[in-house]
Amino acid sequence: MKVLLDECIPRKLKSAFAEHDCMTAPEAGLAGEKNGVLLSLAESAGFVSS
């Protein structure tokens, strides 16, 4: 499962998803995107939305 952590989430939380393909928004090249745009781009990139 691909998981995207938004910029407001502490990067240390990434280690809690070690069994998943987890990235922060900046790592995915999505830094600075607003929520609606970020969600659309993340879904297009295969990240899970819930």
Image (spheres, rainbow, N blue to C red):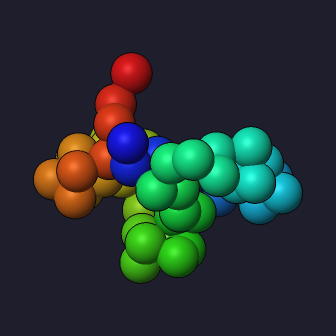
Quadrant of image for the C terminus: top left
Residue 25 located left or right of residue 1: right
Residue 30 versus residue 29 in the image, above or below? above
Residue 39 image offset from top left, x and y in percent: 32, 43
Residue 20 versus residue 12 in the image, above or below? above
Residue 11 image offset from top left, x and y in percent: 77, 60
Q: Is residue 48 visible?
A: yes
Kindly identify the residue that appears in the image at 50 percent across and 48 percent down. 20
The answer to which image quadrant residue 43 occupies is top left
- Which residue is at the far left? 44
Nearest the viewer among 16 and 33 is 16
Kindly identify the residue that appears in the image at 37 percent across and 42 percent down. 1
How many marks can you see? Answer: 0
Residue 12 located left or right of residue 21: right
Residue 14 image offset from top left, x and y in percent: 70, 54
- Which residue is at the far top? 50
Kindly identify the residue that appears in the image at 32 percent across and 47 percent down. 47
Nearest the viewer among 16 and 19 is 19
Residue 29 image offset from top left, x and y in percent: 41, 78
Kindly identify the residue that appears in the image at 23 percent across and 50 percent down. 46
- Which residue is at the far front? 19
Residue 10 located left or right of residue 18: right
Nearest the viewer among 17 and 49 is 17
Residue 1 located left or right of residue 15: left
Q: Is residue 32 visible?
A: no
